[in-house]
Image (spheres, helix red, strand yellow):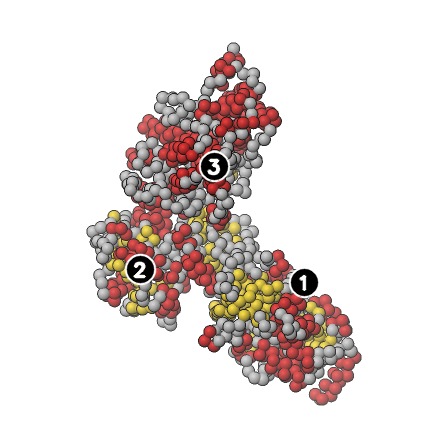
Amino acid sequence: VTESGRPLSRRDLEDLVEGAALLGAGGGGPRWVGLQVITAIAEADKWPRLLQPEDLDADARVAGTASLALPNALSASDQFPWWLSECAFTALESAYGHTLDAVLPIALGPANALLPAIVAAKLGRPLVDVAAAPRACPFLAGYSYASLSGPLLAALAMPGRAPQILRAPSAVEMQQILMKEVQSQGSPGIASLALFAMPANKLRQIAYYYGVSKAIDLGRTIRSAREQQRDPVEAACSALGGKVVFRASRATDVPNKSGSSALTFESLDGRSHLLVYHLAENLLAWREGDLTPTAMGPDIVTYLTADGLTFTNDAVDLAAVSGHELVVIAAAVPEEWRASSMVSGWSAGIAATTAYAGAYVPTWRSREIAHTKSWPSLRDELIHLLTEAAEIEHLICCQYLYAAFSLKQGESEGLDWREAMHTRNWAQLLLLIARQEMEHLALVSNLLTSFGGAPHFERPNFPQSKRYSELQFRLVPFSEEMLRRFICLERPLNVPWREACGPDLLEPPKPDLSAPVGLEFSGEAKESLAALYDHIGRLISNSSDNDALFIGPPNAQISGDILHVNFPRPGAIGGVWDVTLFDITDRQTALRAIKLIVDQGEGGRGAEEYTHYRWFREMLEQYLGARMDNPKFEPARLLVSNPILNQHSDAGRGGTLITNPATRDVLCLFNGVYETLLLLLYRLYANPEMTANQVTALAYTMFPLMTQVIRPIAEILTALPAYDYPSPFRAGPSFEITNAIDLLSHPASAFRVLTEKLSALSLYANELGARADLPDRLTSIGHNLFIMAKKFESVAAGNYPPDLLVPGVAHYYTQRSQN
Amino acid sequence: MSKARNTAARSGRQRSRTRGAASWLGPGSLEDVLLGSCILGVGGGGPRVLGQSLLELVKKLGVPMIATPDDVADTAWMAVSACAGSPTAAAVDPFPYQVATVAYRELESRTEKRFDYVLAGELGAGNSFIPMLVAAKLGLPLVDASGARRAMTTLPEATFAANGVPVAPIVTADENTTVTFSTDTAINADPVLRAIISSGTFPDFAGIALWTMNGATMKRSAIPNTLAYARDLGEALRSAKGRDPVTAVCGFLNGKVLFRGKIVNVTEQVVAGFDVGRTTLKSRDGRAQCTVYNQNENLIAWNNQKSTPLAMGPDLLCWLTADGEPFTNAKPDIAKYAHNPSKKLDKEVVLIGASAPKQSRVPSIIEACMKLLRQIGYGGPYVAIEDLS
């Protein structure tokens, strides 16, 4: 195996230190040790090779290595004796009686991920792309390798001493022996150890796969955010699926009487504190004064400075970030690491070293509770899942629109003609995808109606914690990170997570067409959207006539005929706006709708050409190619992420408050129009109670509202300053739902309300357009709204000439009115 | 003046100044005081076995007169008498309570006050009896009041501290040596006191006398009738024959059973010079687990099925076996009830929670408790037991 694997560059190793520092959860060895190890590797000019675990020969044997040090000993040391790891590894090899073909990382941490790398480099053996856990643990028993059967063998190397071979019946006892040795009288307090020798086939069963690659990717994400002047904290949160739980001006470490230490973070205003209890690795974060901990192991509590520097609980690392704004992030570990045995091990450790012995408080608890409901009937379950699907489609659509609106629009914004062609194409493609997401939302609404449920156009505000494929839903400008997130989101059912969301993304897709489709849907955040639809589809397929699912009134269905989109347009996919809508009245049409949604989005088997998944992959390839040609190519305007006009209780942390007064006024207009659109949609889906003219009025107002009002205001917002102080950052459409959006139940009053809203928005847009500090274009938008309001009122009352009711009629009508 | 004449003169003056004292606490009631004090010791306050030996000493010396606070003249003088230090160092038989007498006399001399009464700082299986022994030895009445209606971990938890009674001068003593010091507050006195006692001058154990005050101050700052409360609690427990003793104790304390199960683990670790104990109970079906953290006295309790605490100090977390035996966290006590199949020890115990009296629910005492909880790794706020579901 020695010739296998891909070489790791210095950049890779630097990214590994940063990513592993985040995954080290405060521990995993100090960051400064990791950086020293890179220097040592560079000086020796021997670079490690990273080998995928599946590429190990079945009869190969491997072992791990890591450091073990007392905090005081580390603080007193200028140079970490990294060479001890090599001593420990070779000593273990002798005691084990087999050649060790490759080196394993045990813990992901800035030092502990790098020490195996230098051992691998020095001994010319590959480093295996695994870890023993998705985070560094304070207890050996918290690592998957601890499940090895039989007595454990370890080699311990300390400065000035011959390596010792230690044996223990279990990881718990081995930890006690190791700690006793390192804490013993005369011990230098610093050691390296090698342990967990095992055959490759065993490793494949128990390892946390691609741990090194994931850490490198995480480090790269933070670095690129820094380089591109994006928010590194946001980038880290997005990559980790985490959230900011505290921002602090400083932190001080105080030992407590139970054996752990509390790193106390003081908030920026000095009024509150967050205590992070740790044993090097963080155990528990607790906002002072809260009755329940903020986050706790096995979930990750980790740190970053606001400007993107990683650090650990080590005193030297902490001193290095003095004066920076410190950010504490909490992120859930993957679900399999939250198994009850894992949680009880962590809980016991936490109870023994802090004064918390209560129940495990998962970081994303509310979502999980939402998913653990059981349903009294198939109808209930379908309505629940489709309501969830409606919310997700809506959230996704807004994200795609934001990305599309963020793109620069031509040479006037510093692009050359090729780059301008790219951004135009990408914007068109993103808008097409967004329209198809609207179509999915409409089909899901028809499905809901057909099952007797209610269409659902509400959704929580941005940003949202991870929903599907472990991803957050956020409004961010076009970027590589955004494309990777969208690819992951649209992952087909039979494409492994790693291929769509992991380090192999840039390789050609290798969907396994023979893989079984339709594994059990758990409803957890790790699931893909495709799995959600697959589950809905199977529920419908497996339903019997006795279930009498399709009880909704057929005339409540909104088809392409009602919206007048069922005619082809050259270049369009589907109807005139790339939208295909049909009535859903039975199992066949319901399954057709699910198939259409999946075929357009993820692709049923991952190999189709016209899918969102493939389009996003192509966009990423084009983007990376363009960046190769011009490393300074920035396709997007410098927009803030998750702009907000107001704080929302249903949104996660990470919203960017727009503070520029003029921009706020335009954002207010935008949100008003967006909310009106949602009210129109609700009213449209309650169509059986309305006259044909009223339905027509709604159908004919919706599309112009999107194309002639929402889109231009969004474009204006991307050019307006975000802040009330000089800053290059611009705002963007926030898609906020600030008021209760619901069905206006009574048609007569509903049409009056909607007409009034359109008229009021028209006046407001005109008022803004007249201001010197805002673009004139708002006046045109005001005129469009005025025409829409008049036409809406007229059509609903049956006073509008029927022959003029064709798409795009507003412009025509305007001309007629003026004539 | 000779020692004999001094004592006679004192007795004469005393009769006029301590006229309200009565001997309501007969030898028979002492057992009830022990039972009640052991429960109110909330895991600390000295081992029950120590309390039993002190009780015998009291009987030998003669039970002192007990004065209710209302009967104490505003101008009468008294101070708090106690012992402090390592329970292990104090585990000698007979218990050297005389060190508390030495300290008390020294404080009297230092303050140039003539003490008419002895005052207790707290309750506990051992700690209820030490001031009683000092009172009996010195022939002074004991005031039925104290700075806490439970055992406390640190001086600032006393109502005397909360009411701003000057804690100094403070005398620490063994039979041969006295050390007197002054600090401005009980918060500052606590670490100095611990430092002196463990400095090597004393055998990790000493008598202490502090909080010199007159009757008016005592009435303003002490919790009245604490000894009678302990006695009545003990009596309620003792007289619950044929009935559920746990219900009887809960009824008296207006408390509730926080957890019922077997003690499966008792750990004590010394970290940075502090002893922190942890007692783990498992429910009968093995599903739920309760962990109680203590620093001698029980500080906070958790159920592993809930993310909020069951109760915390200054509220009471009391131990009782299901068949009505109070016990403490001291090894000789708890070892009797910890689950140990090899020794056929399999007793069910209950953790009872009850509200602290209103005098102990003032900000400074809550703050003192929260400081202790912070030091052992609790990051939350104080929430009264009745507000914790």
User: Can you tell which quarter of the image residue B235 is in?
Assistant: bottom right
Q: Which residue is mark 2?
A: A65
Say what amino acid the circle numbered 2 marks. Answer: Thr
The verdict on a common chain for dots 1 and 3 is no
**Tag in front: 1 or 3:** 3
User: Can you tell which quarter of the image residue B84 is in?
Assistant: bottom right
Q: Position of residue B297 (x, y in %)?
A: 57, 69
Q: Which residue is mark 3?
A: A549
- As measured in the structure, the alpha-carbon distance from the residue carrying label 2 to the one carrying label 3 is 58 Å
Count up the numbered dots: 3
User: Can you tell which quarter of the image residue A148 is in?
Assistant: bottom left
Say what amino acid the circle numbered 3 marks. Answer: Leu
- Image quadrant holding the C terminus of chain B, namely bottom right
Subunit ID for the residue under disc 2: A
Indicate left or right for B335 with A237 as reference. Answer: right
Q: Position of residue A178 (x, y in %)?
A: 36, 67
Q: Which residue is mark 1?
A: B358
Q: Secondary structure at mark 1?
A: helix
For the point 56% across and 27% down, the residue is A689
Among numbered discs 2 and 3, the one appearing first in the sequence = 2
Say what amino acid the circle numbered 1 marks. Answer: Lys
- As measured in the structure, the alpha-carbon distance from the residue carrying label 1 to the one carrying label 2 is 58 Å
